[in-house]
Image (tube, rainbow, N blue to C red):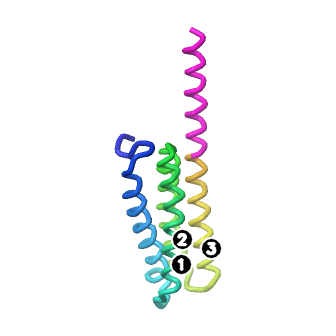
Amino acid sequence: MRWIPARWSRKWIRWELWHALVLTLGLWSVRYVAAGAEPAWDTALRMAVAAVAIATVLNVSGWLGGRWIWLLGSIGATVGLAAMFIVTLDRGHGGWEDLIGVLTFLYLLAIGYGCGVLVEMALAIYHWIQRRRDVKS
């Protein structure tokens, strides 16, 4: 995981911008390509704000040192975007399909983020046990 920036690194700002851009383009592709909706500036702006919020949560987690949280949360977001695209494309263009697609995206994002938190907690416990063993010996 050497390719992921270190804790407190300024590179996270750049990663945040790219992450937000990719999420925004992904959400727009689901809305305007898969769902075939008419482009509207207010909806596009709302999706961009949502993408920036999600990217900010993930990248702040990485900036604070939770690199596994960032990695698994990003994987969850990517899989969630793909699932939302597939659900929206396959099921038609009704209102329920859009809702199911968004809930699928949020569910998979939350699973990825939660798995990242669990991995970070397991690593913290492991390092804590290792330090206690070193102090005793």
Q: Are marks 3 and 2 in contact (CB under 8 Å)?
A: no
Crowding near the residue tagged with mark 1, few <14, some 14–19, many ≥20 C-alpha atoms within 10 Å: few
- Which element is circle 3 on? helix
User: Considering the image in quadrants, where does the C terminus appear?
Assistant: top right
Q: In which image quadrant can residue 13 be found? A: bottom left
Mark 3 sits on what residue? 100
Kindly report the distance in space between the C-alpha atoms of the residues bearing marks 1 and 2: 6 Å
Residue placed most toward the observer, 38 or 18: 18
Please name the amino acid that badge 3 sits on: Ile
Please name the amino acid that badge 1 sits on: Arg
Q: In this rendering, is residue 39 above or below 50? A: below
- Where are the magenta residues, as a range? 117-137
**Residue at x 40%, y 68% (from the top left corner):** 21
Q: Main secondary structure of the magenta part?
A: helix
Mark 1 sits on what residue? 46
Q: Which mark is residue 113?
A: none
Residue placed most toward the observer, 122 or 91: 122
Q: Are marks 1 and 2 in contact (CB under 8 Å)?
A: yes
Q: Residue furthest left?
A: 3
Mark 2 sits on what residue? 50
Is 68 contained in the magenta span?
no
**Residue at x 36%, y 40% (from the top left corner):** 2
Crowding near the residue tagged with mark 3, few <14, some 14–19, many ≥20 C-alpha atoms within 10 Å: some
Q: Are marks 1 and 3 in contact (CB under 8 Å)?
A: no
The reply, left or right, for residue 17 in relation to residue 126 is: left
Residue placed most toward the observer, 137 or 10: 10
